Amino acid sequence: MNRAIDWFARNGVAANLLMLILLLGGGAAAFTTVQEVFPEFSLDSVQIQVTYPGGSPEEVEQSIVRRIEDRIEGVEGIDRILGTATENNGVVTAELKRGTDLSRARTDIKSEVDRITAFPEEAEQPIVTEVTNRQQALQIALYGDASERTLKELAQRVKDDLTQNPQISFVRVGGVRDYEISVEVSRESLRKHGMTLAQVSRIVREGSLDLPGGSVETEEEEIVIRTEGQNYTKNDFEDIVALTRDDGTRVRLGEIAEIQDGFAENSDLITRFNGKPAAILNVFRTGQEQVLDIEETVKTYLDEDLQASLPAG
């Protein structure tokens, strides 16, 4: 230590240069270091998700989950495989051994899944992703004396606007119920047209196979279509051809059923902020995005862009 001090004492220029380098390095680190509450980290697992519209949990398990599990069990680096089957959806998570190259494992797993040819025809293309931990950066509450539909549509617009900004890549809307369309068919109408509720249900399913995040449920004299996004309306379902007669005339669903466009009635979800109805947006940080940049971007959008276009209330 004494020798180093003596050397720097005799070589003042070198000492000043070293100090300058340290200052510049510290300044650069201060501006480039990612600032976050908790660091994003890889969970060392790969997830395979397959949507199977109309599939029961038992059907999803047999025709989706087990086939994926059997196919990928021999992939090098997998520690254990977890499968979950729910209505319309199957998810298989492959947890990897410590030290396994995650990118390579994902590629190998996707290659094996792509070779599966025995999925049901109605099943959608498998989605293979690396599981990452998204961190919530901030939360936005949209509230006021407005209808639930107005709040949900406004929340969706805000989400679309925010995710168009390069500083923000993921926003989730919450606090509002899923859209729901109910198709009520009376026994008299079924007898008049020579149809059964099962036939009507099949027609509805076929007319909404590409329903994102949705489900079709059949109850006594009623069919319920529930979806996260309002990609379908009452008019869309009224226009579905339910029956074609021998003379070529078509009977549309709206002629044999009463169709209502609204929100899920069996949900007890109620969200309020400052005592008024509200919709919530959760803004997340992913990748190299920084919390302070996200906060500034959102604040600017709310103050300069959104405020002037808010509906009354």
Image (tube, helix red, strand yellow):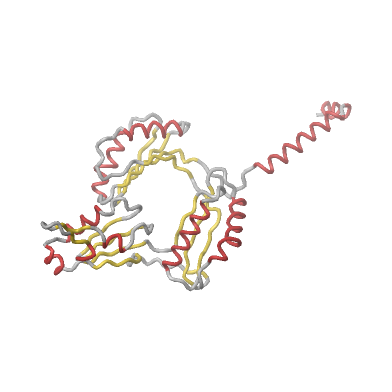
Residue drawn at (42%, 68%) of the image? 148
On the image, the x and y values in percent for residue 183 come to 25, 64
On the image, the x and y values in percent for residue 14 come to 83, 28
Q: Quadrant of residue 73?
A: top left
Q: Quadrant of residue 257?
A: bottom left
Q: Is residue 229 left or right of residue 247?
A: right
The answer to which of 288 and 23 lies nearer the viewer is 288
On the image, the x and y values in percent for residue 232 come to 33, 58
Q: Is residue 223 left or right of residue 102?
A: left
Residue drawn at (10%, 56%) of the image? 246
Q: Is residue 297 left or right of residue 242?
A: right
Q: Is residue 295 left or right of residue 186?
A: right
Label count reads: 0
Does residue 78 sit above or below 278 in this rendering?
above
Does residue 105 sit above or below 302 in this rendering?
above
The answer to which of 299 and 67 lies nearer the viewer is 299
Residue that extends furthest to the right in the rendered view of this protein: 10
Q: Quadrant of residue 192?
A: bottom left
Does residue 253 sit above or below 134 in this rendering?
below
**Quadrant into which the N terminus falls:** top right
On the image, the x and y values in percent for residue 292 come to 62, 52
Residue drawn at (13%, 63%) of the image? 193
Residue drawn at (44%, 63%) of the image? 152
